[in-house]
Amino acid sequence: SQHQFPFAMIMVFLLLIAAFSLGDASKPLGCSRIWHHFGSRCFRFEETLRSWTEAERHCQSLGGHLASVHSWKESRFLETLTVGSPLTWIGGNDGGRPESWSWTDGSGFNYHEWAQGEPNNYNGVREPCIQMNFGEKHRWNDDVCEKRFASVCSRSR
């Protein structure tokens, strides 16, 4: 019976592995290695310079949207994700109605971090898209969507 003990232990071990594997299958997937987890979402910084529309299209091809921002903590997280980065597109757009901002992921526009004097449609030019990391304080600015910047995508886990 001494020889059966290791076999029994191996069987218990294998059964435990199987149970944990099955348990994981029912959980929502986490963020894969190129995505970074924060709250209930995954975020991904895209260094490739794109127009706002191209960036949104690219995020959609990855199963998400340009990032929406809903809290100071989330904003600080995105700032660390884009560290050393210049201006970066996020998913805010005025939909052709100045001062009527919304997020491309359909979530509520319940938080903002505009730089002082923004949004302003500078020099009378329509600026319907939002960039982050603007100015010394790394706040938000409205800008012309055709300009090419880095971007941040987000998707649910």
Image: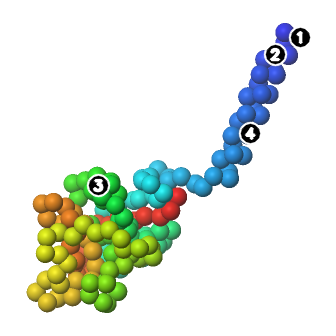
Callout 3 crowding tier (Cα within 10 Å): few <14, some 14–19, many ≥20: few
Query: Residue shown at 67%/51% (left/top)?
Result: 25
How far across and down, in percent of the image, does residue 123 sit?
Answer: 10, 86
Q: What residue is pinned by disc 4?
A: 18
Q: Quadrant of residue 100?
A: bottom left
Mark 2: amino acid: Phe
Q: Quadrant of residue 47?
A: bottom left
Callout 1 crowding tier (Cα within 10 Å): few <14, some 14–19, many ≥20: few
Q: Nearer the viewer, mark 3 or mark 1?
A: 3
Count of all numbered marks drawn on residues in the image: 4
Q: CA distance from mark 4 to mark 1?
A: 26 Å
Could you tell me which secondary element the residue under label 1 belongs to?
Answer: loop
How far across and down, in percent of the image, does residue 34 sit?
Answer: 43, 54
Q: What residue is pinned by disc 2?
A: 5
Could you tell me which secondary element the residue under label 4 belongs to?
Answer: helix
Q: What residue is pinned by disc 1?
A: 1
Could you tell me which secondary element the residue under label 2 belongs to?
Answer: helix
Q: CA distance from mark 2 to mark 4?
A: 20 Å
Q: CA distance from mark 2 to mark 1?
A: 7 Å
Q: What residue is pinned by disc 3?
A: 76
Disc nearer the start of the sequence (4/1): 1
Mark 3: amino acid: Arg
